[in-house]
Amino acid sequence: MVQRRETGALRRGSLVGKYRLVSRIGRGSFADVWRATDTVERRPVALKVAHPGVVAEWGRDEIEHEARIATRLQHANIVATRNADWIGGRFVMATDLATTHLDAYPRARRSSKVALRVVRDAAAGLAHAHRQRILHRDVKPENILVFPDGHAALCDFGVSRFAKSATATYTEAGTLGFIAPEQAYGKPSMGSDVFSLGLIAYELLTGVRPSWPFEWPPAEYARFHKKVPEPVQRVLRKAMEFQPRRRYRNAVELHEALEAAFARVEADSKPAPRRRRRRKPRAAPSPLAVQAEAFRKAHGKALGMRYECRQCGGPIAEAMHWCPWCGAGEQSFLEVTAYPLACPECERGVRPEWNCCPWCHAGRFQSNGRKPRHDPKAERRCARRGCEGQLQPFMRYCPLCKRKPGRLWSHPDLHGRCGRCRWPISRRYWRFCPWCAKRQPEAGSYSRRR
């Protein structure tokens, strides 16, 4: 069969066989990747069109051989190859269309739960390939795709062999920064794929990628130790071992060890079976609890007091630095905040467009550079000329320039003022000022005097 020559450049809207090109997703050293529509089956696909130079260098037989290998791998955590064919002189592979890849998936860097789920999925897919005696050779975040339902899958098996020195990032053995030491010297093994996945896991969980000489513990180990359960830590450490003989020999061993570790974590987290006991009479609520519940029903919604104090359980708002009922500080809203992110210092909610935390003095972070949208909860604008900061009630600083509000805050549901900070309080109910922690007269004392 004679291979036809390529005719014309690919453009948006072009028809390649039965595939209509919608938009270019990316350009790699092996192929261009397009978002396309299968006009026969009426479904979206990712279409990889091999570069002419790759075809000329490696030849038709070699590329078809790798395509047959990819088609042979059928697993939920390996991107399915739906079709591989020569169309108009171009070699084309159609695969399932993912939402994004791991390097552009911020949820995995914000949540250790999501990151570990992605690592488990990638280990399962890699283990299936290793059972078939197939190496990946280029395990990196861009080759781990994330689908709409949240599951992750590996792609580009065998393709790294065709990416011969395309850029400074690639070598014949893989991608610099993620390859195992023995792979860098041209001796890849299944353990090399394991090492690469271990580096990806550590970078996801800490934000730092271990580098030469790969001594343990790497940078940011304290964060790794805090976020990862101890049984899983041991597995990931062994996956990143510098010496191949001390590492898992393949992803099958890694996957089995990971699943056993997570089984232990889940077993330890289950509460022990409770014995049936006599039901004791319910104790009468304390006067403080009665006052707190009465205030929550009357004013809690208007003041945003939908959270509970970590010490007394009384209602508090995210803007409060101390509990107005027991005076406890260091409240954390890390897991319950309605904001998309949380300040690393005070653990209160923040937005990605802000330059700093409006609740605490120490909270500074990197903004995403976008212009803040209109905030319906904002009641003021920053007083600094040229600043577009919007201030919600009880913010201590402007979230864009960190300037303090010019006027003291007030609220229609709070009729008193703290004698120290002059911020609004409820003299009738609160025992402490939630803004400066000054103790107030006992709740109810003012009403009795009247």
Image: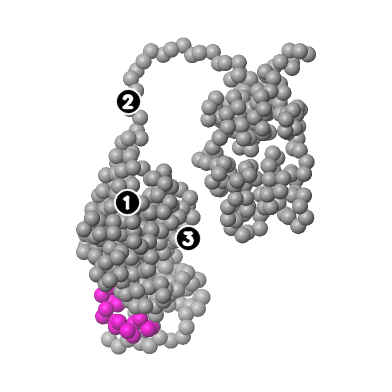
The residue shown at (33%, 47%) is 233
Please identify the dominant SS of the magenta region: helix
Judge left or right: residue 441 versus residue 350. right
Element marked by disc 3: helix
Number of residues whose C-alpha sits closer than 10 Å to that of mark 1, classed few (under 14), some (14–19) or many (20 or more)? many
299, above or below 44, in the image: above
Residue ID for mark 2: 273
Residues under numbered marks 2 and 3 in contact, where contact means CB atoms less than 8 Å apart? no
- Verify whether residue 267 appears in magenta: no
Mark 3, residue position: 104
Residue nearer the viewer, 270 or 46: 270
In the displayed structure image, the side of residue 379 where residue 264 appears, left or right: left
Q: In percent of the image, x 78 and y 41: which residue is there?
A: 407
- Between 103 and 65, the one lying in front of the other is 103
The residue depicted at 25 percent of the width and 49 percent of the height is 256
Label 1–label 2 contact, CB within 8 A: no
Is residue 320 visible in the rendered image? The answer is yes
Return the x and y of residue 125 as percentages of the image width and height. 30, 57
- Is 71 within the magenta? yes
**Where does the image place residue 15, in percent across and percent down from the top left?**
45, 77
Residue type at mark 1 is Leu
Q: Residues within 10 Å of mark 3 (few under 14, many from 20)?
A: some
Q: Magenta stretch: give its range.
A: 52-73
